[in-house]
Amino acid sequence: MKSFAFKKCRYFLGRLERGADILAGLTAFCNTEDIEAGTISAIGAVESGGVGYFDQAASEYREMRFDQGMEIASLTGNISLRDGKVFLHCHVLLADEQGRCFGGHLLDGNIAFACEFSIQALTGEPPLRLPDEATGLFLW
Ligand code: ZN
């Protein structure tokens, strides 16, 4: 097990503009506010979106894309550094008009209809993502 302790934090509430790419927009916000470690959550809706599923046997992400409006029933994630850059790892649950949910890794191309987010920014040594032999992923 690995863990990281932080004693100070800043807390942000914010909203992305309609049409913004959610992952890119949140990453840009972290860069602007100099946030290198933290947690993130959001709710709202996308005009179109997509989630990723990591195929463990093939060791690659599969993508599911949705070309329709969906609710962001939940978005949760964390902020750390990978290759010296701010890296957001987020998962999202998207709900269709009947409340059916599709969930997975937040991909590029989730376009905000409305997106209200909260970020808890932690001050201290940020976790670093490094290659993990057991999974083939970049983990803390
Ligand atoms: Zn993921």
Image: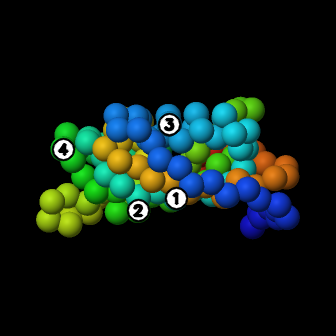
Q: Which mark is residue 41?
A: 1
Q: Could you tell me which residue is drawn at 69 percent across and 39 percent down?
A: 33
In the foreground, 30 or 106: 30
Give above or below for 4 relative to 130.
below
Give the Cα distance between marks 1 and 2: 7 Å
Q: Which mark is residue 25?
A: 3
Q: Position of residue 22 (x, y in %)?
A: 44, 41
Seen in the image, is 77 located left or right of residue 84?
Answer: left
Give the Cα distance between marks 2 and 4: 17 Å
Give above or below for 103 relative to 133.
below
Name which residue type carries label 2.
Ser
In the foreground, 111 or 12: 12
Give above or below for 48 relative to 3.
above
The residue that mark 4 highlights is 68
Name which residue type carries label 3.
Gly
Q: Could you tell me which residue is drawn at 45 percent across and 53 percent down?
A: 116
Looking at the image, is mark 2 or mark 4 earlier in the sequence?
4
Asked if labels 4 and 1 touch by Cβ distance under 8 angstroms, the answer is no
Q: Position of residue 36 (x, y in %)?
A: 73, 44
Looking at the image, is mark 1 or mark 3 earlier in the sequence?
3
